[in-house]
Image: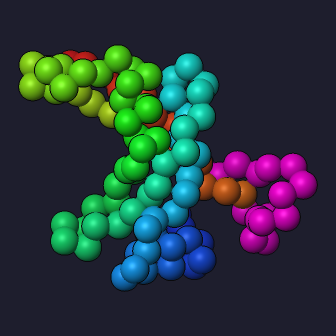
Amino acid sequence: MREELREDEVREVMGEKSKGLGVRVYDRLGYVHGIRLQYWSCNGYYSLCGAGWTEVVEAYGVRPEDVDAKELVANVWSFRRRDSGGGEEEEGVGKLVFAVDVVAC
């Protein structure tokens, strides 16, 4: 994941007092959720978290008892999206975006 981040995004994701980087996450129905990308130094993982993640889980109809009863897999893709007229893009590189699909095995 680190290789995919621009330097300004690294500071937002990995800074000691960082609350994470705000990103858009698309679910399989095309709905957009605002989520935070954070780096957890305790285990070296990147995590999508925050209230938006709860929306994604609810969009897939996952309930707490489902997590105990089934194995759930989240397929996650990252890409860059150029927004027209945003002006926030660095050297033609668009904003970091994720697509998520949750399946029960």
- Report x, y in % for residue 52: 46, 41
- The percent position of residue 72, horizontal first and vertical second, equals 23, 27
Q: Is residue 9 magenta?
A: no
The answer to whether residue 83 shows anywhere in this view is yes
From where the camera sits, is residue 71 visible? no
In the rendering, at what x and y percent does residue 7 appear? 57, 79
Residue under the point 54% across and 38% down: 33
24 vs 82, left or right, is left
The image quadrant of residue 37 is bottom left
Residue under the point 40% across and 80% down: 17
Kindly indicate the quadrant of the structure image that contains residue 60: top left
Quarter of the figure with the N terminus: bottom left
User: Which residue ends up furthest to the right in the rendered image?
Assistant: 85
Position of 27 with respect to 43 (left or right) is right
Q: Residue 80 colored magenta?
A: yes
Is residue 16 positioned above or below 104 on the image?
A: below
Above or below for 38 versus 35? below
Give the residues in magenta.
78-93
Would residue 68 appear left or right of 56 to someone viewing this image?
A: left
Name the quadrant of the C terminus: top left
Q: Kindly identify the residue that appears in the image at 38 percent across and 50 percent down.
A: 49
Q: Percent x, y for residue 98? A: 53, 44
Quarter of the image for residue 46 reads bottom left
Q: How many numbered callouts?
A: 0
Which residue is most to the left? 68
Front-most of 8 and 52? Answer: 52
Main SS of the magenta segment? loop
Q: Nearer the viewer, residue 103 or 11?
A: 11
In the depicted structure, whether residue 68 falls above or below residue 10: above
Q: Is residue 80 above or below residue 16?
A: above
Residue nearer the viewer, 96 or 54: 54
